Amino acid sequence: MPPLAPIGVRPDRYLPVPESAGAPAVNPATGYRLQELGRGLYMVTDNSYQSMFLVYERGVVVVDAPPGYAKHIRAAIAEVTSLPVTHVIYSHSHKDHIGGVTELGGHPIIIAHEETRRLLARDNDPERPLPTVTFKDRYSLKLGTQRLELSYHGVAHEPGNIFIYAPEQRVLMVIDVIFPGWMPWRRFALAQDVPGYFAQVAEIDRVPFNTLVGGHVSRVGTHDDVRTQLEFMADVKAAAQSALKSTELGKEIDPLDLTNPWAVFDNYIDRVVVQCVNAVSPKWQSRLGGFDVYIWDQCYAMEQSLRID
């Protein structure tokens, strides 16, 4: 077994977070940090969640409003302008990113991908009102002298998760895919399509941005962050592939359990994952924040995807 605590076992202390994962502190008086990203474009963060807003001549466009967080967005907007929120963009359907939209007030136009609307109609959640404008592939939002380009690149994290690109400011927002300086959230951020997730990380690297807003963790990202995540993911994939080929089914199990196929496969999968974790830990455990928290999840997800996708 590797020295890292497996799933379900609590360590006395997790590995220290590397300096590369850090960011400026949140203002303790306000509970948020406001970062200007370019002409009229801002990120609001509590160093755990990230939202964005764009100021144009007649109003404000908000991108995502996590529940219990919208008060920070309103306060941050008030630091910059007295203009009203006229538009809201949903990055995707998940409540932890858009469940605070009703707290913004007013009656903004809500824009989202058609798959996001489908999922929200299914969920019937009054805290996530249905979008009033939807699109299939691309949508250009032009307001005054400001512009946001919305595009859909297929299923990775979930259906409907879109790219939001500000071309003048060279800022790209894609939620729950890239985690600058950090290990991705468990099982490749709960990706509903692991091969699609891998492809989408590569697609993000091809966008000509200077700044990436990923929706989580404490700082914005760069192309170097995307390439670091690509390298890490490639290492996990290679380690899982090697372990799948070299691990013998049914070898390390009580012979009396060989008639129990669930036990046989569970034993095999666990040994594959141990090999995967052992293979990637020396290179990565000091480079990514939260490595020891979710490396087991990543190896399980990779092993499973390689076997069945």
Image: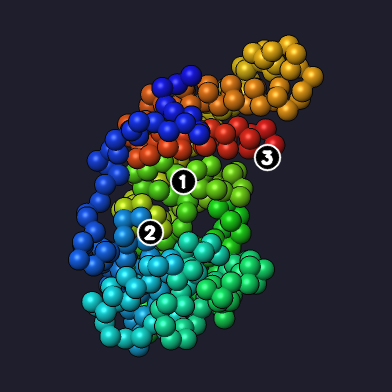
**Disc 1 residue type (three-letter):** Trp
Q: Nearer the viewer, residue 90 or 9?
A: 9
Q: Are marks 1 and 3 in contact (CB under 8 Å)?
A: no
Give me the residue at 71% from left, 22% from top: 264
Quick check: can you spot residue 151? Answer: yes
Nearer to us: label 1 or label 3: 1
**Where is residue 199 drawn, in percent x and y?**
55, 47
Disc 1/disc 2 C-alpha distance (Å): 13 Å
Amino acid beneath label 2? Tyr
- Badge 1 density bin: few <14, some 14–19, many ≥20, Cα 10 Å: many
The numbered mark, 3 or 2, whose residue comes first in the sequence reads 2
Q: Nearer the viewer, mark 3 or mark 2?
A: 2
Q: How is the image coloured?
A: rainbow
Residue type, numbered disc 3: Asp
Say if 81 sits above or below 223 in the image: below
Residue at horizontal 50 percent and vertical 43 percent from the top:
186
Circle number at residue 113: none
User: Which numbered disc covers residue 185?
Assistant: 1
Q: Which residue is mark 3?
A: 309
**At numbered mark 1, what does the secondary structure look like: helix, strand or loop?**
loop
Distance (Cα) linking label 1 and label 3: 20 Å
